[in-house]
Image (cartoon, rainbow, N blue to C red):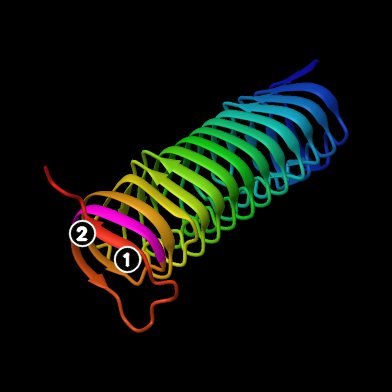
Amino acid sequence: MQLIKDKEFGGERPLFASHDLHLDHVIIRAGESAIKECRNIVATNCRFEGNYPFWHVHGFTIEDCYFDVGGRSALWYSDNLKMRNTVIDAPKMFREMHDIELEDVQINDADEIFWRCQNIRVKNLKIHDGTYPFMFSENIVVDGLESDSKYVFQYVKNVEIHNARITTKDAFWEVENVTIYDSELNGEYLGWHSKNLRLVNCHISGEQPLCYAHDLVLENCTFDAASDRAFEYSTLNADIRGAITNIKNPTSGRIVADEIGSVTIDENILEPANCVIEERKRS
């Protein structure tokens, strides 16, 4: 592998079609597509300021690097990426990619990141600002996530999340086969129109959570007192610890809680309208 150290590159396609390179303490200045159509690339302690640096790259590692605001749309149409200890201030990262591993990464403008990606493994990721992270992506495993971005995880499939703190609204809309463990989910309209969404040991806050959900499962979950009108038009099996303020028009299934503030069943409920709702028997 050829080592390129303490160099600067700018302009258009300075390293086009390169392979077997180790870039160390390299700066990519203003320009476009610096590392395009490349393979087997390692970048350590580098700074990326130009647009679209990694497009159509196959097999690459990025460690201890920084993406400036100008390095927008940096990782598209690429695969087999390992990224560690990296800070990203640029938007629209990770598009149409597969086989991505991230560890200890911070993304400060998470606008439209991870769109249409597959096979993502994440450990200790922080994402801030922006809209629609992870949209249309599949096969995702996350352990450790902090996010205040808007509309996270919409239209995703086959996802497993552990130890997340997500503050947003409209999270997990129209998802399929998603399980979330030991997490805090804060925001309005959580999980609407989902299929096979499962929450285990989670705390939920925000208005009108988990409506229009199909085959929803809650295990040992808790709700904030302000979470009202839960489960409208949903089919579910829910084990709730503590109190839930209000349940409205669930379609079918079973809901058990330690305490239920109120239940709204009105003429707008959908058939079969046979959801069992009960407070847990106290010994």
The residue most toward the left is 283
Tell me: residue 167, above or below residue 20.
Answer: below
Would you call the spot at circle 2 few (<14 residues within 10 Å), some (14-19), or many (20 or more)? some
From the image, give the main secondary structure of the stretch colored magenta: strand
Give the residue drawn at x 51%, y 64%. Answer: 193
* Residue 231 on image: x %, y %: 37, 64
Residues 263 and 102: in front is 263
**Which residue appears at 72% of the width and 43% of the height?**
97
Q: Secondary structure at mark 2?
A: loop
* Residue 79 visible here: yes
Q: Position of residue 197 (x, y in %)?
A: 48, 51
Q: State whether residue 168 appears in this view.
A: no
Q: Where does label 1 land, which residue?
A: 207
Q: Is residue 17 above or below residue 110?
A: above
Residue 211 point in image, percent of width and height: 42, 66
Residue 250 picture quarter? bottom left
Magenta stretch containing residue 158, yes or no?
Answer: no
Task: Give the secondary structure at mark 1.
Answer: loop
Type of amino acid under label 1: Glu
Quadrant housing the N terminus: top right
First in residue order: circle 2 vs circle 1: 1
- In the image, which residues are magenta? 252-259
State the count of labels: 2
Q: Is residue 259 left or right of residue 69?
A: left
Q: Which residue is mark 2?
A: 225
Q: Is residue 257 magenta?
A: yes
